[in-house]
Structures are given as structure tokens and as C-alpha cells.
Amino acid sequence: MSVRPQRILGIESSCDETGVALVQLDEQRPPQLLAHALHSQIDMHQAYGGVVPELASRDHIRRVVPLTRQVMADAGLSLPDVDLVAYTRGPGLAGALLVGAGVACALATSLGKPMLGIHHLEGHLLSPFLSADPPEFPFIALLVSGGHTQLMRVDGVGRYELLGETVDDAAGEAFDKSAKLMGLPYPGGPHLSRLAEGGREDAFDLPRPMLHSGNLDFSFAGLKTAVRTHLVRLGWLDDAAALADPASRATLVDLAASTQAAIVEVLVKKSLAALKETGLKRVVIAGGVGANRLLREQLGRACQRRGIRVHYPELHLCTDNGAMIALAAAMRVQAGLAQPSHEPVFDVQPRWPLASA
Ligand code: KG4
Ligand code: ZN
């Protein structure tokens, strides 16, 4: 007798994106994404130059139920078909996390179904398993998001060893803060990357922080300070008119290209060092910065030369989304690791090391 597939609803609300998705788990088959929906708050926060936590929480409240309805309709199913409700338990903004956790627990309780809190970074880390070219364990994972820069050794679901991480700003923060200094909108990473096109990567002398530190840690705070120093020297710091002046553009394009090149070089070299140290032949790049084209090109080229396979999530699943949360829950259930609860648990974890998840 065949067992009915399990359907897992995933809710992501840790920062400025509300994501909902439905993943199906069949026996002996990789998890399948049935439907997913996303609302990005970027437009709302842009006026403030960064995420305003209270506004983020309120917007998650407005979006999460309509998005859930949309996902169920797109999958051609209804809520009683859901077997487990997964949500992001942390890390992230406390208020924003509480919205997702509250809705997930209320929904699961009213349906009489279990609920499961998931680590946001585990979602990012496992997201390439929804791609057309999923990785095999073990692999090195480079997690590069707005709040985290980590190198992990991944031996299986739930078996994560931290090899190195940033001691200050994350790579995404380095992109965002440098972009803000250059007068670009929030979130700066994709804007800086676009501005950098055609620029000279060696036009500005920028530091490659901790490149020769002898370990796998990162530091990006000094890079942002160096960008600031160049802008002071140019007389453009906090001068919106000078930054927007077409006469400044060629120099700004070079500064953006130099900044991006510095961040990418450190990420690539440290990833190669982690691969060399562990002897592993696979690397997974996850998190928003994983969408960066230069990073993909340079890491791809360096790995090809060394016979190393590089895996990415599908481009639309690089940034925050509900699919990765439902998927992580599905893989935890499949691995026999998850203990879904029938009791609502409101213990979100704004700070939460992945190794202890
Ligand atoms: O993983 P994510 O969506 O959210 C967090 O969990 O933080 O990552 C967001 C980060 C932001 O810092 C954003 O600027 C960066 O990812 N990002 C990029 C690109 N797309 C997103 N950075 C560089 N190049 C990109 N193309
Ligand atoms: Zn994220």
C-alpha cells in the first residue's frame, strides 16, 4: 500500500520578505515544490534606507494570510491537505519572526496538525536541493546573506560544522553599506553590482580584509571604511547632488567595481581554502549575495580548474523565501530529525547559531 505524500507548508518572515510555500514529500523521492508566493517589502523600506523592524512586522501581518491562500489555490489544494506547518524560528527580527510563528502555530492548531520551527540559515543552506542540479553530501557551504557570512562543512541534514565566519559585517552588509555611501537605494547589493558593470576593478586600492589571516574567518567592516575614505577624498561624502552628477558617474562605476571585486575575491579565496583544508569536492553557495554575478563567475572558473562542483539554489530562491523553510522541514522529517510539536511554541530565536539547531 502506498503512503499518502506529506505536504508541508513553510512560512518565512524573519526580515523584509514574507514567503509562503508548499512542499510535497513522497517516499523515496526528493522533496517537490508545489507552489510558492512571496511579497518583498523593499519598496516600503527604501524610503528609510534600511529595514524598519516595526513596519516589517506590521506588513508581515497584512501579507501572510493572503499569500497562504494564494499558495493553496496555486497548488490546487486546501488547508486540510497540509500535514505540517513549518515556520522560521530564527535568527532574524524578533517582531517579524513572531508574526510567522504566531500565524503558523495558530493555523496548525486550528487544523489539528503539528508545527515545526526551522533555522533560517538551514533553509538557505538546503535550498539548492530544490534546484535541477541538487548537490550530494558532504559539501562546503558558503552562506552569504545580509546578516551572515559563514563557511560550513555539511555532512548531512542537521550535521553542520562551522569552519569560519565574519568577525564584524557580513558580505551583504558590506555591499549594502558601501552602496548607501555611493548614494544607491536599499538593498544596495544588486544596485552596486549593476553600477559596477564595465568598471575598472583595480581603479581604487581597497583592502582584502583577513585574506591572509590563516583561518577561515572574514572581516568586512574595514572595506566599508575604505570606501568612505575614498568618498571623503573625492569630496562626495553625504553629497547626494555630487553623487548623482553625471560627471561623477565613471568614477563611481570604478569605485563600485573595485568594491565588488574586493568582496568577491575574499569570498572566493576563503571558499577555496575551505575546500582545500577539508579535501571536499563540492561547494554550495546560498543566501542573497549568492545571486551576485561576479561571485558566480569567479568561483565557477576557479572551481572548474580544480575539478570542484558548484551548486546554487535557483536564482529566485537565493533570497529569502518560504520554499526553503518548507524544504528544510521536509528534509528534517525525512532524515528522522524533526520533532514536530502539537503544542504551540512561541519561542522564536532572534539570535541562534546554526550548529545548535
Ligand atoms: O539572504 P537574504 O535575502 O536575506 C538575509 O537573510 O539577509 O540576503 C540579502 C542580502 C542583501 O545584503 C543584498 O544586498 C544581498 O543579499 N544581495 C546581493 C545581490 N542580491 C542580493 N549582493 C550582491 N549582489 C547581488 N546581486
Ligand atoms: Zn536570508
Image (tube, rainbow, N blue to C red):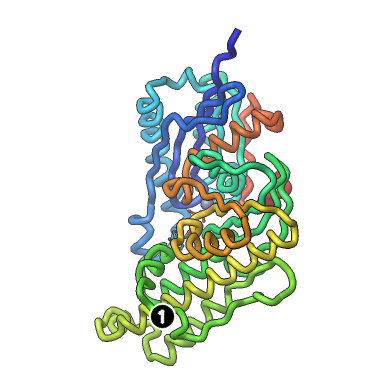
Q: Position of residue 198 (x, y in %)?
A: 35, 74
Q: Kindly identify the amino acid type of the residue bearing the numbered disc 1.
A: Arg
Task: Give how far across and how far down residue 30 sits, in percent.
Answer: 56, 30
- Point out the image quarter for the N terminus: top right
Q: Can the viewer see residue 99 in this picture?
A: no
Q: Nearer the viewer, residue 244 or 53?
A: 244
Residue lying farthest to the top in this orientation:
1
**Quarter of the C terminus within the rendering:** top right
Q: Does 288 sit left or right of 169 as displayed?
A: left
- Residue 306 appears in the figure: yes
Q: Which residue is mark 1?
A: 200
Q: Nearer the viewer, residue 162 or 275?
A: 275
**Which residue is drawn at the image coordinates 53% and 54% (left, top)?**
287
Towards the viewer: 235 or 65: 235
Q: Position of residue 163 (x, y in %)?
A: 72, 59
Q: Quick one: which residue is furthest to the left in this view? A: 246
Give the side of residue 176 with respect to residue 215, left or right.
left
- Left or right of 235, for residue 104: right
Quarter of the figure with residue 128: top right
Q: Position of residue 355 (x, y in %)?
A: 72, 49
Which residue is at the front of the view, 331 or 132? 132
From the Cβ of disc 1, is ligand 1 less than 8 Å away? no
195 relative to 161, above or below: below
Count every numbered label the image shows and give the total.
Answer: 1
Image point (56%, 33%), residue name: 86
10 Å crowding of disc 1: few (<14), some (14-19), many (20+): some
| Element assignment for label 1 | loop
